[in-house]
Image (cartoon, grey):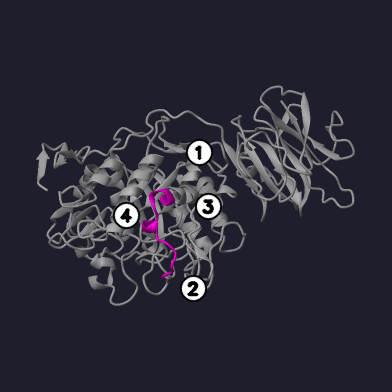
Amino acid sequence: MKLVRVSLAVVVVAGTVLVPSASAAPAEPDWVGPLSTRGRYVVDARGDRFKLRSGNWHGASGTWNGSGDIADPANHHAGEKADQVPLGLDRAPVDTIIDGFAELGLNSVRLPFSNQMVHDTAVLPDASVAANPGLRGRTPLQVYDFVVERLTARGFAVILNNHTTTSRWCCGVDGNERWNTAQSTRQWQDDWLFMARRYAGNERVVGADLYNEVRRSVWDDPNWGSGDDRDWQRASQEVADRIQLEANRNLLIIVEGINWTGIPVDGLPHGRPTLEPVRTLSHTLVDSGKLVYSAHFYGYTGPNHSGATGIGETTDPRYQDLSLDELREVLRRQAFYVSAETGAHFTAPVWISEFGVGGRENTDARSKVWFSNFVDELVRADADFAYWPAVGFHTNRTGNGWALLHWDAAGNRVGVFDGDDWRAPAWSRLVGAAGRTGQVAQVPRWSMLNLDHGDFQPSRAVRARPDWNPGARKGACPDGQRVIGLAHTGNRGLCTGDWAAPTSLVTVRDESFVDVDWASGYTKVQCPADHYLVGYSVTGAAFSAGLCARAAGPLGRTGRTVWFDRGDNRPSGGPGGEFALRAYKGQCSAEEYVAGVAYTGRIGSARTPDALLCRR
């Protein structure tokens, strides 16, 4: 095809506009940080939709394959040696690379780093930044700082991504499988606090992508909810709490689903859970409106296929083996339902933070069809995305080929829009797709409480006061929300609302404030007048106390008793979603508040919640 350049604004191939803009500005140059979420959308500080159109600029997390001389480029992935800094700084000036991101239509960059890089105080060889002589004499982290500064100064949003622990190419059985495989959980948390504080003054550093592709190690699997040291749900919840409470409350907290469990051998259990467990166990942040979930998809992998060829290869289909209808169903089940199903505790933006395919040298027809179909599904879902990788190397227009932009040793660039890359039409569809824009209205928040393994109190107001029921496991709603539902067994709860943060809290353990017998024969723990339930505690399985917040004004006294000791008793449709799988649940309507909880200690009962007093 003949390439025709039209001024500096567009690139046209065979009469088709492929690039929306080749100016040096990102796709949304006037956005205002920090970012937050409203329902399924990411928004800026003005409440305008900010769709993450991102690229991955890798290198600072390591490119070494893990064997051989680390100084030899042949021992780095695809011969691309980065020396723990974003790839390409030895071949092109930083701002030239950023110009390329603008031409691609990006507005944000996922910037991987390793924990090893954070702690490395050695000065880089001059050759590592040969095209950026002003960076000579700096450590890898200082170069990372500079890249962050230039990206944000140019109007791009930056998402910090803890990609690996040690500086090497990801991902396999490589010692980086989990956040704590090669270091302690405490060290991982402390490194996140360090990074979050480091960029706290820059509101265009918008996100903390907590860890990349959590997966099986040689000996064991990660899990979602077991409470042990391999529990990714709990670990990500705890580090999110520390980031928000101790370091930087402005950041989006980005949690990727589990990438792989099991041994990839036919006949043995194995698979890619991704975001499926979120449906019944989601995260509840101290600062609501900051949670984003993420997932990765590549055509050569599959829902139950590791992506391997030879050892580790199974007969399970790869994503690129699926029909369009099958692919659509799998994508919804594994990820897109989180944003598509609104009004649930798990509802959040979904960022497909990695996907990609080989470019101009790719001869695999199935991968090409998959990429085109996958892009169409991203467009159809109006999904946030980040292509992997944005930057790569080439020699005479050949090489790894996956990147959207490649530089050779002399600084010559080839890109997806140069006229010989089959991905150009699909990429243009993606970055140019119409989607939700403008103001996004506030939506009701739903949050789940999980006392499975200890206290769960994502509330600044509650955390700031002394222990309100020593010796018990305690749950409390985020500030501004109230308890709206409880499980009969299992200690789970559901919160909702958008009220003022509580300023006065009362612990209630008995019937001191009962004003009417609304559950005859049962012990009733009731809030004082004009108070509503924001927390509860359990001792073992037994309900032990309620935490009540004073309302800003008078509350209604007319109510009803909602029994759930023999079955679910919830409003039609189960608003808020499934918050206590396989347990009976009671829930007040959205126009009501929980004024009391009833239980019984009679023989055969475990003092678990049996009824709610719901008042308007």
**Residue designated by label 2:** 218
Q: Which mark is nearer the camera, 2 or 4?
A: 4
Q: Label 2 amino acid?
A: Val
Q: Earlier in the sequence, mark 4 or mark 1?
A: 1
Please give the name of the residue rendered at 35% of the width and 49% of the height, measured from the top-left corner. Answer: 374
Please give the name of the residue rendered at 68% of the width and 22% of the height, measured from the top-left corner. Answer: 553
Alpha carbons under labels 1 and 2: distance apart: 37 Å
Please give the name of the residue rendered at 31% of the width and 37% of the height, measured from the top-left corner. Answer: 433
Out of 53 and 398, give the one closest to the viewer: 398
Q: Is residue 264 left or right of residue 129?
A: right
Q: Earlier in the sequence, mark 3 or mark 2?
A: 2
**Residue designated by label 1:** 289
Residue 267's x, y, as percent? 52, 71
* Mark 4: secondary structure: loop
Please give the name of the residue rendered at 52% of the width and 48% of the height, measured from the top-left corner. Answer: 246
Alpha carbons under labels 2 and 4: distance apart: 27 Å
Q: Label 3 amino acid?
A: Glu
Out of 338 and 147, give the one closest to the viewer: 338
Task: Decide whether residue 320 is among the magenta residues.
Answer: yes
**Residue designated by label 4:** 356
Q: Label 4 amino acid?
A: Gly
* Mark 1: secondary structure: loop
Query: Do tag 4 and tag 3 residues touch (Cβ < 8 Å)?
Result: no
Q: Label 1 amino acid?
A: Gly
Q: Is residue 560 left or right of residue 420?
A: right
